[in-house]
Image: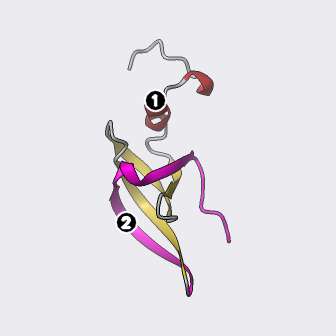
Amino acid sequence: MTASVSTNPSTLLPLELVDKCIGSRIHIIMKNDKEIVGTLQGFDDFVNMLLEDVTESEATPEGRRVTKLDQILLNGSNITMLVPGGEMPDT
């Protein structure tokens, strides 16, 4: 990345936006309807992500199941949506 990259979010490329989220909380919605919130530590060109201080939420027939994890490596091919700075909705 060069120093001349604009900071206007509308001109950022997707990986540049993800790069700006390192060290911040990020809300991720997965293809299997799981939702994950954690602090982004790093990622690669395939958007595989290393997250810390993670909360995973999943809808089950018995209700919503919430799991807390110290650290996960998330496969980028299963991500549907990323919300920078997002937190888990209270539902």
Q: Residues within 10 Å of mark 1 (few under 14, many from 20)?
A: some
Q: Main secondary structure of the magenta part?
A: strand
Quadrant of the rendered image containing residue 2 = top left
Q: Which image quarter is the C terminus in?
A: bottom right
Looking at the image, the residue that sits furthest to the right is 91
Q: Is residue 65 above or below residue 84?
A: below
Which image quarter: residue 74? bottom left
Relative to 3, say whether 53 is above or below: below
| Residue 82 included in the magenta stretch of the image | yes
Coloring scheme of the render?
secondary structure
Q: Position of residue 14 (x, y in %)?
A: 48, 32
For this view, does 5 lie left or right of residue 89?
A: left
Say which quarter of the image contains residue 88. Answer: bottom right
Q: How many marks?
A: 2
Which quadrant would the N terminus be assigned to in this image? Answer: top left
Q: Where is mark 1, residue-wise?
A: 16
The disc placed on residue 70 is 2
Q: Position of residue 76 (x, y in %)?
A: 37, 49
| Rendered image: mark on residue 44 | none
Residue 48 x/y as whole percent: 34, 47
Which amino acid, mark 2? Asp
Nearest to viewer (mark 1 / mark 2): 1
Q: Secondary structure at mark 1?
A: helix
Q: Residue at x 60, y 57 (%)?
A: 87
Residue for point 53% across, 25% down: 12
- Amino acid tagged 1: Glu
Along the line of sight, the residue nearer the viewer: 51 or 61: 61
Helix, strand or loop under label 2: strand
Q: Please report the bounds of the magenta region as a residue range.
A: 62-91
Residue 83 lies in the magenta-colored region? yes
Q: Are marks 1 and 2 in contact (CB under 8 Å)?
A: no
Which one is earlier in the sequence, the residue at label 1 or at label 2?
1
